[in-house]
Image: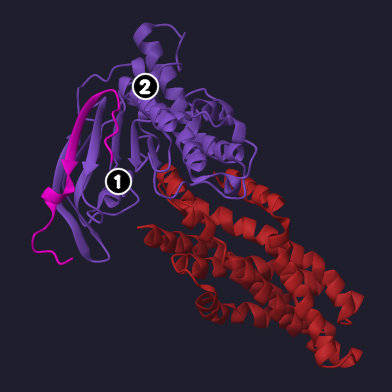
Chain colours: A purple, B red
Amino acid sequence: MQSANGKVSSCPAKLTMMRNGQLNNQVKDIRSVDSPVNLPLLSVETLTCERSDVALFSNLSFSLQKSQCLRILGPNGSGKSTLIRAIAGIHKPVHGSIHWNPVAEDSHSQTGRPKIAYIGHATGLNNELTALENLAFYASIHGNLSGLSPTECLEKLNIAHCSSLPCMQLSAGQRQRVALARLVLNQYDLWLLDEPATSLDDQGIELLLNLGGTCLKAGGGVVYCSHQPLNFRGEHDSINLLNFKDENAQC
Amino acid sequence: MLITVIKRDLKCVSHNLSSSVQPIGFFIIITSLFPLAVTPDPKVLQGIAPGIIWISALLATLLALDTLFKEDFVDGTIDQMFIVANSLYVVAFARIISHWLISGLPLILMCLIIAFMLQIPEHSLDALIVSLLLGTPTLSLVGSIGAALTVGLRYSGVLLALITLPLYIPVMIFGASCISADLIGLQWSGQAYLLAAMLVLSITLAPFATAAALRININ
């Protein structure tokens, strides 16, 4: 993976050089390089997902523009988490397709996938490692293009004081903050947040909203599901999975 | 990514030494039960020692297998690694290597003491070490398939043993006969070559099967 990251980060340097004819400020702000064609960041077509042979939703189509925020609505069990996992590529949909257009030309990793940050119900934090060690692990597998060290990422979420504690000793809210600190490790094209406000206090939600606003401003997208609306600063849209429920499906 | 994951696993071990030494402790206790239960007679012990060592090695490996992917699966780390790499092959391979480093390698070192206890003469130590060096990685590789298949179950210990132990039989047969052959003064290179062949085969195929099983489970 390290060699792949090396290749990815070498791309913007070349691009900027060709455009401006000079080498300064190459990697610093990749997002400032505008994409030539204004394609949607993400387009989902006729997506049908099942879980344990029960159809959750069918023929779901939508697209997400750059700097747009999308909220997925639906009652419990309607497939919100499954949709987010399908977009992340973890869940295989029964039918339909998901297309990507990167924010900047370099954003595609070697595998042709965009840079996704996914925060799910499971935090992805190892209980035995400390908060800092967990984040350092993600920094080394994701690459660290934002230029922030893992400690600085923890500071952004106001949780740096817990950096040397094993994750099992943290409270649920503190763990969520450490998990969210992953979002600032890299410059991601898309944030996929599954109930990100779970166990966060008001200040934590405010921090998350601010960080989300920065991501949207830079041309990224945010797809989230949450039972309370999160007011990310940017263009808002929502879809209700109840409208795509297959009437004939047995529940 | 391979090295990053292995480094992380070793760091976890250093934070939680007690749970990582359990399989080794288990190995020592099982092997020391035989002289107590059967007979302390050196001749008899020498005859059954290869079998004792290999059966104990299988059980100790099995004990550490249960947690091979479970933690990463439950806490969502596997999802995160899959998003980055778009394949679980490297993840599976890295976890197998760390499993062997944590459970297989100390077991081989421990064998030097166990061999003394089971009256294995010094000249047979090389056969013992070679058979374990070639055999225990195969155990980790083959066992990882079972661990990946049962990762989604809450209590998978017994099912894991039922899936994995039959697959361990060929390794056990040739591993034990490698030592037995040397004890009675025969050439043991044939068995060692077969163990090496099984190792090569499982290195080639097992990580793919493990990655596929994990992929099914995170879907």
| Residue visible at 24% across and 19% down in the picture | A36
Is circle 2 on the same chain as circle 1? yes
Q: Position of residue A168 (x, y in %)?
A: 58, 49
| Residue A155 horizontal side relative to residue A63, left or right | right
Image-quadrant location for residue B112: bottom right
| Residue visible at 36% across and 28% down in the picture | A209
Q: Position of residue B213 (x, y in %)?
A: 42, 64
Host chain of mark 1: A
Q: Secondary structure at mark 1?
A: helix
Amino acid carrying label 2: it is: Thr
Give the residue number, with chain letter if any, for mark 2: A214
Q: Give the mark, 2 or 1, whose residue is nearer the N terminus.
A: 1
Image-quadrant location for residue B174: bottom right
Amino acid carrying label 1: it is: Ile
Q: Nearer the viewer, residue A239 or A106?
A: A239
* Magenta segment boundaries in residue numbering: A228-251
A85 is higher (above) or lower (below) than B213 = above
CA gap between label 2 and label 1 equals 21 Å
| Residue B105 horizontal side relative to residue B152, left or right | right
Give the residue number, with chain letter if any, for mark 1: A84
Q: Is residue A239 magenta?
A: yes
Question: Would you say residue A12 is visible in this rendering?
Answer: yes
| Residue visible at 47% across and 8% down in the picture | A24
B137 is higher (above) or lower (below) than B187 = above
Question: Would you say residue B181 is visible in this rendering?
Answer: no
Q: Position of residue A175 (x, y in %)?
A: 51, 42
On the rendered image, what quadrant is the C terminus of chain A found in? Answer: bottom left
- Which residue is at the far top? A21
Q: Position of residue B150 (x, y in %)?
A: 47, 69
Q: Secondary structure at mark 2?
A: helix
User: Is the residue marked by circle 2 packed among few (<14), some (14-19), or many (20+) residues within 10 Å?
Assistant: some
